[in-house]
Image (tube, helix red, strand yellow):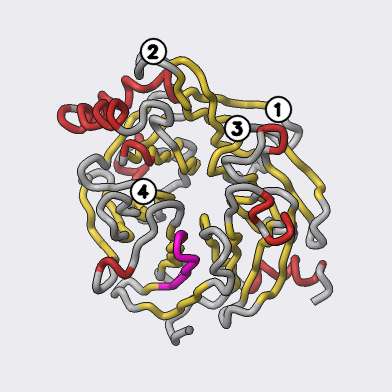
């Protein structure tokens, strides 16, 4: 279903499998569909796939599933025919980005002892930035900045974090799912904590989003406990506000929020009526489109829709593959952006 106010383009997504063999014939299918939901192009891979990016030249960059066998994990770039033209082996987890320079900030995980957080083994967030020549330019270890996080949260929110780790997440204490290298936005002009190049993260286990100062490695802003509930894909928008999919894992209904990070308050919210009709306990996300609408991925349900600022749903798509696992994220691309892919694919 599409309405008159939609942002016309093509939508990229993939069902995410627990294991490669969960896919049909052990194959993951990555789809680019038109506004009518018809397939425009498809790639396949004999591995579990999670996050996808269509590159300007028509190639596709994808990450393996976070639970993929370690010897097969990492990033892969494929051409329109699905041939691997570049890869990077790392223990990737959930997110990566492609900078204008071609460099790649990647979120990984490391299992290690972290006594400052608690006893026994911990799964810790680990950021790197690598070049296309596979040189590591920067790395960041989450367990080294736990006190930064607590200091930014302060008071009851800091105690909330400690209790969440103790009671619910003694191993996977952070479960970061985002690593956005911040663009130049209105927020940076008002507060250097949101300067371009700093890193926006999302600790799902702790219901917390925050910002890492790239130059020092310190966490300089954090927010969310008591408001967020298992969130995904916070994104700093051009106006300096943060878009975030708030899963409501314990609440049992989801919503999409826009947050003023300086005032630390929710300024816009989308939820369904009844609210339980919109719910994904895990995965999911939202993308700000050029016309101001939002593309929402209700991942667990395999449901994508576009909603206007006045909360009208103007495009609606449900995956025809209900037996497959949910959709981790979805991205809408303009017709112009997709042209290199179409030319190379002979369409």
Label 3 and label 2: CA atoms lie apart by: 26 Å
Above or below: residue 280 compared with residue 250:
below
The span shown in magenta is 300-306
Q: Is residue 159 left or right of residue 214?
A: left
Q: In percent of the image, x 58 and y 54: which residue is there?
A: 16
Q: Position of residue 75 (x, y in %)?
A: 68, 42
Tell which circle, 2 or 4, labels the residue nearer the N-terminal end.
2
Residue receiving disc 4: 231
Q: In percent of the image, x 72 and y 70: which residue is there?
A: 41
Label 1 and label 2: CA atoms lie apart by: 30 Å
Q: Position of residue 64 (x, y in %)?
A: 64, 45
Tell which circle, 3 or 2, labels the residue nearer the N-terminal end.
2
Label 4 and label 3: CA atoms lie apart by: 24 Å
Work out whether residue 39 or residue 111 is closer to the camera in this orientation and state it.
111
Q: Position of residue 117 (x, y in %)?
A: 35, 19
Give the number of the mark in front: 1 or 2: 2
Tell which circle, 4 or 1, labels the residue nearer the N-terminal end.
1
> Disc 4 on helix, strand or loop?
loop
Give the number of the mark in front: 4 or 3: 4
Q: Which mark is residue 135?
A: 1
Residue receiving disc 3: 129
Work out whether residue 207 or residue 295 is closer to the camera in this orientation and state it.
207
Residue receiving disc 2: 115
Q: Determine the image quadrant of residue 59.
A: bottom right
Work out whether residue 64 or residue 166 is closer to the camera in this orientation and state it.
166
Tell which circle, 1 or 2, labels the residue nearer the N-terminal end.
2
Label 4 and label 1: CA atoms lie apart by: 32 Å
Tell which circle, 1 or 3, labels the residue nearer the N-terminal end.
3
Label 1 and label 3: CA atoms lie apart by: 8 Å
């Amino acid at each position: 279903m599409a309405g008159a106010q939609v942002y016309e383009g093509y939508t990229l997504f993939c069902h995410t499998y627990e294991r490669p063999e969960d896919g049909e014939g052990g194959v993951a299918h990555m789809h680019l569909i038109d506004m009518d939901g018809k397939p425009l192009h498809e790639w396949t891979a004999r591995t579990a796939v999670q996050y996808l990016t269509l590159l300007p030249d028509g190639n596709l960059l994808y990450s393996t599933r976070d639970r993929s066998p370690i010897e097969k994990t990492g990033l892969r770039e494929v051409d329109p025919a699905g041939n691997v033209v570049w890869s990077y082996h790392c223990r990737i987890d959930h997110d990566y980005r492609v900078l204008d320079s071609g460099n790649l900030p990647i979120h990984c995980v490391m299992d290690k002892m972290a006594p400052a957080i608690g006893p026994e083994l911990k799964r810790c967030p680990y950021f790197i930035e690598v070049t296309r020549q596979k040189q590591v330019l920067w790395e960041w270890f989450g367990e080294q900045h736990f006190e930064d996080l607590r200091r930014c949260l302060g008071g009851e929110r800091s105690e909330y974090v400690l209790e969440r780790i103790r009671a619910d997440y003694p191993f996977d204490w952070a479960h970061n799912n985002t690593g956005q290298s911040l663009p130049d936005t209105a927020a940076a002009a008002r507060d250097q904590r949101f300067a371009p190049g700093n890193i926006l993260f999302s600790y799902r286990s702790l219901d917390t989003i925050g910002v890492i100062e790239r130059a020092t490695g310190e966490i300089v802003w954090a927010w969310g406990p008591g408001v967020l509930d298992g969130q995904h894909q916070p994104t700093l928008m051009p106006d300096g506000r943060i878009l975030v999919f708030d899963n409501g894992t314990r609440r049992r209904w989801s919503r999409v929020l826009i947050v003023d990070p300086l005032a630390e308050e929710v300024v816009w919210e989308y939820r369904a009526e009844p609210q339980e009709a919109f719910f994904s306990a895990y995965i999911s996300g939202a993308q700000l489109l050029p016309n101001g609408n939002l593309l929402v991925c209700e991942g667990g349900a395999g449901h994508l829709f576009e909603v206007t600022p006045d909360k009208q749903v103007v495009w609606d798509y449900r995956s025809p593959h209900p037996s497959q696992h949910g959709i981790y994220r979805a991205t809408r691309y303009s017709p112009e952006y997709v042209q290199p892919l179409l030319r190379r694919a002979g369409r």
